[in-house]
Amino acid sequence: MNDTIDNGATKAATEYLDLYSKYNTSLRTWFVGFGFGFPATLILEDKAVDKLVTAQSLECVVLLFLIGGSAQIFIAWMNKTVNWCGYYGAENKGFKDTSGFKWSDWISKQYWIDIFFDFLTFGVYVRAVYLVFDAYALPLPPTVLPLLP
């Protein structure tokens, strides 16, 4: 019994790739949603903005979230481009000899690139959330506190 499909890949490999693709899509969706949704929510909440301004962290928090969200958008764009080149190379044999195809073929085998961008995103998000919690942990300035007798 032959356990391969049309392109020579095993059924198990194809199943693992399908699962990887689903988890990858889910993770990227969460990263992008959190990366742009969390700062938008913070900015709409006046108390949060005030606390972050007082802690001098607002710009840094927004920048960190933009970096994380942008990293995920970049890696999604890169993966889209790489996969299109793979598709086009499969359909047009002459394209396989181009530097574009060779580049995309090499990139498609470099899993560490995805991992790097995921860790980068996770790291900047953790730092941004820490800064938000730290801003909430700061004591109120003396001008806000009522004077005690």
Image (cartoon, helix red, strand yellow):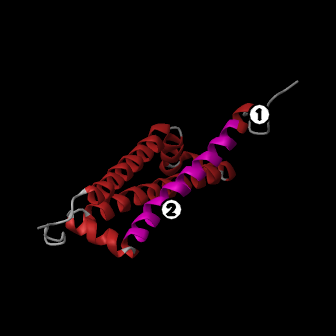
Give the magenta range: 16-42
Q: Amino acid at mark 2?
A: Gly
Q: Is residue 81 visible?
A: no
Left or right: 10, with 103 as reference point: right
Q: Is residue 97 visible?
A: yes
Q: Position of residue 125 (x, y in %)?
A: 38, 52
Q: Give the residue at x 53% y 43%.
A: 108
Q: Give the residue at x 23% y 69%.
A: 53
**10 Å neighbourhood of mark 2: few (<14), some, or many (≥20)?**
few
In the rendered image, the residue lying farthest to the front is 149
In the rendered image, the residue lying farthest to the left is 149
Q: Position of residue 26 (x, y in %)?
A: 59, 52
Residue 113 position (above or below residue 83): above
Q: Element at badge 1?
A: helix
Residue at image mark 1: 11
Residue at image mark 2: 33
Q: Give the residue at x 53% y 55%.
A: 30
